[in-house]
Amino acid sequence: MQIVRQLDPLRDALTAFRKTGSKIGLVPTMGALHAGHMRLVEVANEQCDAVVASIFVNPTQFGEGEDLDAYPRQEAADAALLEQAGVQLLWAPTADEIYPEGFATNVSVSGISDGLCGAARPGHFDGVATVVAKLFNQIRPDAAFFGEKDYQQLAVIRRMARDLDFTHEIVGVPTVRDPDGLALSSRNAYLTAEQRKNAAALPEIMREAATAIAAGKAVSAILADATTGLLASGFHKIDYLELRDANTLAVLNDFTEPARLFAAAHIGRTRLIDNIPVS
Ligand code: PAF
């Protein structure tokens, strides 16, 4: 696996892939790889001839007081995993290759970025959309792979790609979970043993709420009960627990399909997010 940090050698490597007619798949990441990322690589390998992974801890998607400095960085271990998984090229750009001196452009996807994590983390999705647009232009993949764990992010990227005429496929890959149901996340590493045990209440309570909503129970009452349940299970702050249209992300006060339940909740110093289909 080649590890490339500058744009010129990146372009040379990509030209070589294209000369052989390879379908190029891109798996963008911020590193600290876990089985969820490796599933993206696996799906990319199934659908493409050459897989490019990127690792860049993107400062513009972190708000003030968020965990940019603490975010786990372990490039050597990540590179070993990616190589073992058959990734052909690791794009690990320097900050200058992404944000050169005087960088002044912002990609902002209005509407779909506004609620949920967009409300709790102002500016987050501008940072995501901007860096992903840059990665799409730098790699020009035939397909790009993102986890459904960050479902709003996936929706923002799909809209950005449509609006800015990126024509490659955007592939959403189902969330990978630990046996107790907790969605895999690089931020799970922040949890103490007790918090990790309690964190399983998030998917469990969401699953119960989704079942009750699908059975026709009043959405607002179910969400209120679920919030109480989370607060009783070790979570101390709920940013949101909402039923939304799975395509438009519009708020649903009553159950209509396609629907998805979204949550973000704080346990200790860790903010966990999750989402599941309601059907
Ligand atoms: O999901 C992530 O890891 C990041 O938000 C992404 C898509 C790599 C952009 O920095």
Image (spheres, helix red, strand yellow):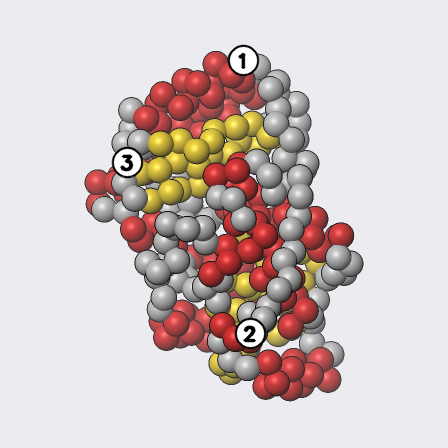
In terms of sequence position, does the residue under pointer 1 or pointer 3 come before the other?
Answer: 3
Residue, disc 2: 101
Q: In what element is the residue under mark 2? A: loop
- Left or right: residue 231 versus residue 50 is left
Q: Is mark 1 within 8 Å of ligand 1?
A: no
Q: Which residue is mark 3?
A: 198
Element type at marker 3?
helix
Q: Position of residue 151 (x, y in %)?
A: 56, 44
Q: Earlier in the sequence, mark 2 or mark 3?
A: 2
Q: Residue at x 31, y 53 (%)?
A: 189
> What's the residue type where badge 2 is placed?
Glu
Q: Measuring from the top left, give residue 279's x and y in whole percent.
A: 59, 27
Image coordinates of residue 99 in percent, x first then y, are 55, 70
Q: Is residue 255 left or right of residue 185?
A: right
Give the CA distance from mark 1 to mark 3: 27 Å
From this viewpoint, is residue 20 visible?
no
Image quadrant where residue 73 sits: bottom left
Q: Residues within 10 Å of mark 2 (few under 14, many from 20)?
A: few
Marks 2 and 1, how far apart at CA:
53 Å
- Give the residue type at disc 1: Ala
Q: Which residue is mark 1?
A: 218
- The label on residue 94 is none
Residue under the point 51% across and 34% down: 262
Extreme residue in the front direction: 102
Name the foreground residue: 4 vs 275: 4
- N-terminal-most mark, 2 or 1: 2
> In the picture provided, is 261 more to the left or to the right than 13?
left
Relative height, residue 139 to residue 159 (above, below): below
